[in-house]
Image (cartoon, rainbow, N blue to C red):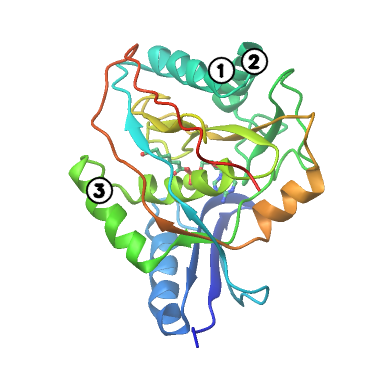
Amino acid sequence: MPQDLYSVRMRASKAGRHLSGAERIIVPDKIDDVLRAFVARAMERADGPDEVFVKVERLKDGPPRELTALDVVTVNVRDVREGRSAAAVILQKSGVSRSAAETAVRSLAGGPGPSGEIMRGAIIMDAQNGERLEQDRSRGVRVSRFDWSESASVEIDRLLVTAGLTHFRTKEALALATKVAHAPGVVAELCWSDEPDYTAGYAASLKTGYVRFPRLKDPGDTNGGRVFFVDRAVLDLDALMRYLQKEAVLVTATGKCGDAVEPGMNFLHPVGKIEKP
Ligand code: WAQ
Ligand code: MG
């Protein structure tokens, strides 16, 4: 009889502003260690938090859905301009219009919240006309209840280290992007961190895999965020929200982690195998 699984979530804030968050799905034995690690991570920041919330919740809706991680490739862009335009090209290959891709880049660059601040969650954007569909424009939608399985976690660590990718952000973002890419109605995602010193980001979809760009912003820039592009023709917004926020996903298998490529190289391969539910 498999052990129950628990969702453990952390969010930290200062003066009402979101600072950091994290997510795990774990067996009860690990809860202690994970809580410790989450609180340490929240407290480590130079701009120490006023409040740290941690939530531990048993997953009651049966076993998590199991997914295979997206393939990973890094495109060696030299600067922000090249990075953002290469990311827009990847988004277009996934079915996002050029104008929606550009709207998304502008939103993240300028601070996606109502007064140019960062959001806690993601923008939901019409992949054709760039219209924003998320109900709360300062919070956005937060993806929750996802993690690596224990064996896939060990394996992806090995693959990412071999590819020279050792930052915890890459591993977490790959799990999140894998969940999002499989979401009903989602065609692609664009992301870069709000962390001022973390300049890398990615464009991801089932068609392209997880395509990283070392520079989607300049060091020191505190803006960042996520955009989930949706196909309005098939979108059921309630079903999408339920999947992103409530449905537990474990990434139980790894994809490929390829060598870095130069901008303009055609590294995309036909996928075709992955079908949405
Ligand atoms: N659900 C939805 N949106 C989120 C979530 C979530 N669980 N967590 C963060 N966001 C949004 C929110 O608007 C943040 O401001 C923004 O994303 C960035 O969050 O391969 O670390 O945690 O090395 O700063 C990219 C990795 C790292 C690139 C992204 O994001 C690579 C990262 P951060
Ligand atoms: Mg952050």
In this orientation, which residue lies closer to the viewer: 249 or 20? 249
Q: For residue 159, which numbered disc appears in the image?
A: 3
Disc 1 CB within 8 Å of nearest ligand 1 atom: no
User: If you read the primary sequence from the N terminus, does the residue marked by circle 2 or circle 1 appear first?
Assistant: 1
Q: Residue furthest front?
A: 273
Labels in figure, total: 3
Between the C-alphas of marks 2 and 1, the distance is 6 Å
- In screen coordinates, is 124 left or right of 255? right
For badge 2, the amino acid type reads: Ser
Residue 102 screen position, x and y as percent: 60, 15
Q: Are marks 3 and 2 in contact (CB under 8 Å)?
A: no
Query: What is the quadrant of residue 199 in the picture?
Result: top left
- State the residue at coordinates (68%, 54%): 243
Q: Secondary structure at mark 3?
A: helix
Q: Which residue position is annotated with label 2?
A: 97
User: If you read the primary sequence from the N terminus, does the residue marked by circle 3 or circle 2 appear first?
Assistant: 2
In this orientation, which residue lies closer to the viewer: 217 or 211? 211
Q: Is residue 203 above or below residue 39?
A: above
For badge 3, the amino acid type reads: Leu
Q: Secondary structure at mark 1?
A: helix
- In screen coordinates, is 253 left or right of 64? left
